[in-house]
């Protein structure tokens, strides 16, 4: 064993297993760390949903506005859009996996149910977060297949059956405006979207509140205000998304004829 004295001004000695990597691994494996990650990824996903809605609302500004915006996202951003998509996908997968893991861990820690279950502070929204989240996940998969990858590319319109992939505007851009109108003119697609928005509303109504609570951003006296904020934001998202479908069905937003190849 060496008896050499250590220089007090020398490099810091770090014991094995106590470095930043080990601390991060231990922290993220804990329930607290995973809850924080669920909150952070949830905040990012809510932010995306808001901006996604803002972009979709351009349908009320007409075909030129929406098609130009869609072209900008798909072509002008180049590799940035794929980086953003990869980051969004990673956040979504992490959010889902950690949420399910926390749910299973909580269930495993109480293998025997209480004789009398009294959810004093629990709400129907908080008790069904995993289930509403699963429905939203299934909808997101369909939404990507429908509008992003165009795997579901045929729809019924007032002018007949049409293929999304053949829709271009006068400038040769993908006619996203007509695509949305055609999609929501198909009854089962419209109903599916409306039902999914209700589940998204229920999920976000509690999810937005829990983000603030999980990250410790609010004091107890501000909880009612944050609850109102959660209901308000989720309500606006619900109203905006359903307004697009309703506008198509009521004829306020109409197909622009003559732009299919």
Image (cartoon, grey):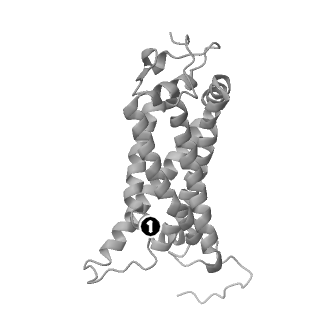
From this viewpoint, which residue is outermost toward the right? 9
Q: Residue 17: x percent and y percent? A: 50, 74
Q: Residue 148: x percent and y percent? A: 49, 32
Mark 1, secondary structure of its residue: helix
Which residue has dot 1 on it? Answer: 126
Nearer to us in this view, 106 or 162: 162
Residue at image position (63%, 28%) is: 66
Above or below, 234 relative to 57: below
Residue at image position (51%, 70%) is: 33
Nearer to us in this view, 15 or 168: 168
Above or below, 41 relative to 34: above
Q: Is residue 142 visible?
A: no
Other-residue count near label 1 (Cα within 10 Å), few / some / many at <14 / 14–19 / ≥20: some
Q: Residue 139: x percent and y percent? A: 41, 43
Residue at image position (56%, 16%) is: 168
Residue at image position (55%, 10%) is: 258
From this viewpoint, which residue is outermost toward the front? 250
Horizontal arrangement in the rendering, residue 127 relative to residue 85 (left or right)? left
């Amino acid at each position: 064993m060496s008896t050499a004295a250590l220089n007090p001004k020398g490099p810091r000695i770090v014991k094995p297993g106590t470095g930043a990597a080990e601390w991060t691994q231990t922290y993220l494996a804990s329930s607290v760390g995973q809850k924080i990650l669920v909150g952070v990824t949830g905040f990012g996903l809510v932010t995306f949903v808001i901006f996604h809605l803002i972009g979709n609302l351009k349908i009320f500004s007409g075909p030129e506005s929406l098609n130009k915006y869609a072209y900008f996202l798909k072509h002008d951003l180049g590799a940035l859009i794929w980086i953003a998509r990869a980051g969004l996908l990673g956040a979504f997968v992490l959010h889902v996996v950690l949420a399910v893991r926390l749910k299973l861990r909580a269930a495993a820690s109480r293998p025997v149910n209480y004789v009398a279950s009294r959810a004093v502070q629990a709400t129907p929204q908080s008790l069904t977060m995993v289930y509403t989240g699963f429905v939203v996940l299934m909808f997101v998969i369909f939404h990507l297949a429908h509008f992003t990858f165009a795997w579901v590319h045929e729809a019924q319109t007032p002018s007949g059956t049409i293929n999304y992939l053949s829709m271009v505007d006068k400038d040769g851009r993908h006619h996203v405006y007509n695509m949305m109108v055609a999609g929501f003119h198909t009854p089962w697609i419209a109903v599916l979207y409306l039902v999914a928005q209700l589940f998204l509303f229920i999920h976000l109504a509690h999810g937005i509140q829990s983000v603030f609570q999980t990250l410790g951003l609010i004091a107890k006296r501000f909880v009612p205000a944050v609850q109102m904020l959660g209901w308000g934001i989720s309500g606006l998202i619900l109203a905006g998304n359903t307004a697009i479908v309703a506008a198509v069905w009521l004829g306020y937003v109409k197909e622009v004829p003559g732009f299919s190849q």
